[in-house]
Image (cartoon, rainbow, N blue to C red):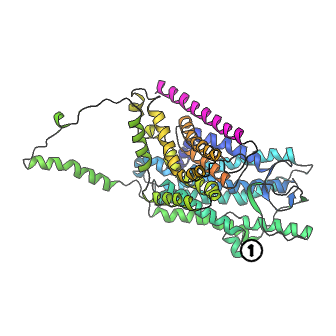
Amino acid sequence: MKYFHNIVLSDYRQRTRTYSFLITLAITVYMAYLFVPLNTATYTTLNVPGFKGAYNSAWVGYVSGIMTTVMLSLYGFLLINSGIKKDIDTEVGLIIASTSITNFGYLLSKQLSNFLVLLTIVGCTFIVNVILFFIRSEGYSFIFRDFILPYLVFAIPAIFLVSALAVVAEVFLVKRNILQFIIYFLLFGAVLTTLSARDATTFATLMDPLGLTTVTHNITNEINTQFQANIKNVSFGFIAKGEKTFRVFVFEGVNWQLPFLLSRLLWISVSIGLVYVSSFFFHRFDFEQTASERKKKVADPRKAVGTGIIPAGINRCSLPPLVTDYSILPFIKIELLLLIRRGNKWLWLINIGLWGSMLLAPLTIAHAYLLPVLLFLQVARWSDLITKEKTNRLHYFTYASYRPLSRILPAQILSAIILAVALALPVILRYAITSDAYAVINILNGLVLIISLAVCIGGITGGKKLYEIVFFLLTYAVLNKVPGTDYLGSIPHASSGGYAFLILALNVVLLMITFIVRKYQLRHV
């Protein structure tokens, strides 16, 4: 228990003391503020066509609890799926492997530290939404039970499951982050897709990991009973208002049934079971095979000497002549090769498939949906664009090189932009053929924006987690057409030139911050 407690506590402290976590927490607090929109807002977070819930304790508590569950289940995985990887990179895992803690004990400690990180965010969103109730309550009394129950029943089991899935993904897909993201988001999308198609049967309730089937059917039943309507579907997320007039209904909360409460306990048990099963496949930081291969490589020269064969060593005359080149082009070539060769080769099959689909699909579909998805699949390539030097402990060499601020950093940025333009080339060419210069400028502006975000966030935080979360949320917002998030210009805007200038100005500011941060790092290495 001493080892178990120390691992949980130290891992939790290490994660919550990073800039990435603090900035993510700030973003989440702001999103929690948006969970309960003003009556004059142009969006809604729980959409029932033609109806709007009165801001009483039950409605504000359930809406905020549901949105916290959905959003943290969505991007919380990105925040916590590197606990084991960090122990591998820092070689702390070798020390842990030498202790008496079992595989299951270690993985369970990682799950609990993941859970505590997400629970901290849940607690902050809960406090924010309690404050929001007193601001937007419309005269209704505050009932603490209506606030706390949605978080206990919906959010806690959901983030416990997400914490377990993050551990399982790291066990079976070691260092394959992009594959972890793809599989997890496919599972999450499948859960949300089947949500509206389910009836509130006992089996459907038990099979719902987020617990949203019960609450959606309670809301629709209450509306249909009060207004003799025929509402069937309820949508979650930041959704633009389609109707201007609403009928207000009073939501009194969910009538808790035993099968539903058992389903929440079932998913907590499933989470622990998944971690337990994965413990049988955990490598426990065993690199014996790699060590034996190294021993063979080291032993071969000795065997050669013993047989009378003398190693030739390094002959200066046989080396190519030293050529001095202070231009930026070799760095661009090297960085571009590093970006292309990063990750598994099979991922390029998906990239090529989406790239070809953008040539054949309708231009609006390719621009609004296929291009953002293709760009997000490169998140692992761009997230450590300027942080990989510190990760691999090469920054002492690169920072001491000739003019790193005007050669290495621009080369990293330009190589990423070149790759982004190559990926977006089908859409750019199709707009160029139709002489739509404004669309081409918007796409180029957006490509520079995601690269500028990568280098700026990476330079400030020194890590890649925050960029992965921000880029995912941005992609999610673009695919759902959330106003103000269309960085590729796929949605018509009232002021076309003004919007393009705004993105351009944002790019300039982000790049300026990046160069200022890197200049500071060069002087304080």
Percent x, y for residue 416?
A: 49, 43
Kind of residue sitting beneath label 1: Asp
Residue at 9 percent across and 48 percent down: it is 306
Q: Quadrant of residue 265?
A: bottom right
Q: Which residues are magenta?
A: 496-525
Residue in front for this viewpoint, 465 or 40: 40
Q: Single out the residue that lies furthest toward the top.
A: 523
Q: Is residue 17 visible?
A: no
Residue 240 appears in view: yes
In this rendering, the answer to whether 276 lies above or below 517 is below
Q: Is residue 6 left or right of residue 44?
A: left
Residue at figure coordinates x 50%, y 54% from the top left = 177
Residue 270, image x, y percentages: 59, 66
Q: Which residue in the protein does label 1 denote? A: 199
Q: How many marks?
A: 1
On the picture, is 285 further left or further right than 497?
left
Report whether 303 appears left or right of 106: left
Q: Is residue 329 magenta?
A: no
- Magenta stretch prevailing secondary structure: helix
Q: Secondary structure at mark 1?
A: loop
Residue 500 inside the magenta-drawn segment: yes
> Residue 373 at x, y = what percent?
58, 55
Decide: is 495 above or below 287: above
Quarter of the image where one finds residue 268 = bottom right
Q: Position of residue 135 (x, y in %)?
A: 86, 44
Q: Residue at point 49% right, 41% down?
A: 385
Q: Nearer the viewer, residue 166 or 113?
A: 166
Residue density around tag 1, few if under 14, some if 14–19, many if 20 or more, within 10 Å: few
| Residue 90 location, quadrant | top left
